[in-house]
């Protein structure tokens, strides 16, 4: 507590000091984060974006992203300010939610979307792996970090239209480690939802 007076731990979402039982986010932010609750509806609007494109059971996202909001602050800490613990904690929290949902009961392995080796060297870690790590801890499901490999690096797709994103990723990955899993939870750090 004395050290906290001099070097207080701050909430990664709002910047306010954390109290002793708080971790990553303060209770106020945890309460106010914009949760999607997609796990409650396997045919949610995110899942519908994939219909006719890929075979999947469901698609989910933990939080809605709004510019200049708490979630943007969290993702900025995770991706650009060297705080992988943010990804682990968010994954752990989401895993506690998903393990209660019937549609996620059959998951056999958690596979993070890989980043290019050059990007990993720059950042020091893959943020999707950190989220997958937290999911695995709370869901008690193994991870498959070597199942997928990125074949080449793409430019950031944050400003690319959704249709182009699908096309850009068709050849960006390959199966690395052979596997026999049927139910895979594929994890990425962000995904764009079509608002139409």
Image (tube, rainbow, N blue to C red):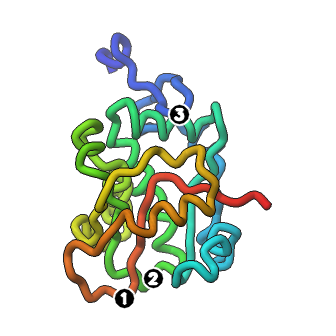
Residue 137, picture quadrant: bottom left
Query: What is the C-alpha distance between the residues marked 2 and 1?
Result: 13 Å
Is residue 165 visible to the viewer in this orientation of the structure?
Answer: yes
Query: What is the C-alpha distance between the residues marked 3 and 1?
Result: 35 Å
Disc 3 target residue: 73
> Residue 42: x, y in percent?
63, 78
- Which is in the foreground here, disc 3 or disc 1? 1
Q: Residues within 10 Å of mark 2 (few under 14, many from 20)?
A: few
Q: Residues within 10 Å of mark 1 (few under 14, many from 20)?
A: few
Mark nearer the N terminus (3 vs 2): 3
Q: Residue at x 48, y 60 (%)?
A: 168
- Which is in the foreground here, disc 3 or disc 2? 3
Disc 2 target residue: 105
Mark nearer the N terminus (3 vs 1): 3
Disc 1 target residue: 182
Q: Residue at x 22, y 72 (%)?
A: 176
> Residue 45: x, y in percent?
70, 69
Q: Residue at x 32, y 76 (%)?
A: 109
């Amino acid at each position: 507590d004395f050290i906290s007076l001099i070097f207080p731990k701050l909430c990664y979402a709002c910047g306010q000091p954390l109290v002793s039982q708080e971790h990553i986010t303060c209770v106020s932010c945890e309460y106010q984060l914009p949760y999607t609750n997609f796990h409650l509806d396997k045919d949610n609007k995110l899942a519908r974006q994939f219909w006719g494109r890929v075979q999947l059971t469901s698609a989910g996202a933990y939080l809605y992203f709004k510019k200049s909001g708490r979630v943007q602050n969290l993702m900025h800490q995770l991706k650009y300010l060297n705080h992988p613990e943010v990804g682990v904690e968010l994954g752990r929290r989401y895993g506690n939610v998903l393990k209660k949902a019937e549609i996620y009961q059959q998951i056999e392995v958690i596979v993070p979307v890989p980043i290019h080796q050059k990007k990993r060297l720059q950042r020091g870690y893959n943020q999707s792996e950190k989220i997958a790590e937290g999911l695995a801890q709370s869901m008690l499901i193994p991870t498959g970090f070597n199942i997928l490999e990125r074949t080449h690096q793409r430019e950031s797709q944050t400003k690319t239209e959704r249709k182009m994103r699908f096309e850009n990723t068709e050849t960006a990955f390959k199966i690395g480690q052979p596997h026999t899993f049927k139910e895979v939870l594929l994890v990425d750090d962000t995904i764009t939802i079509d608002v139409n």
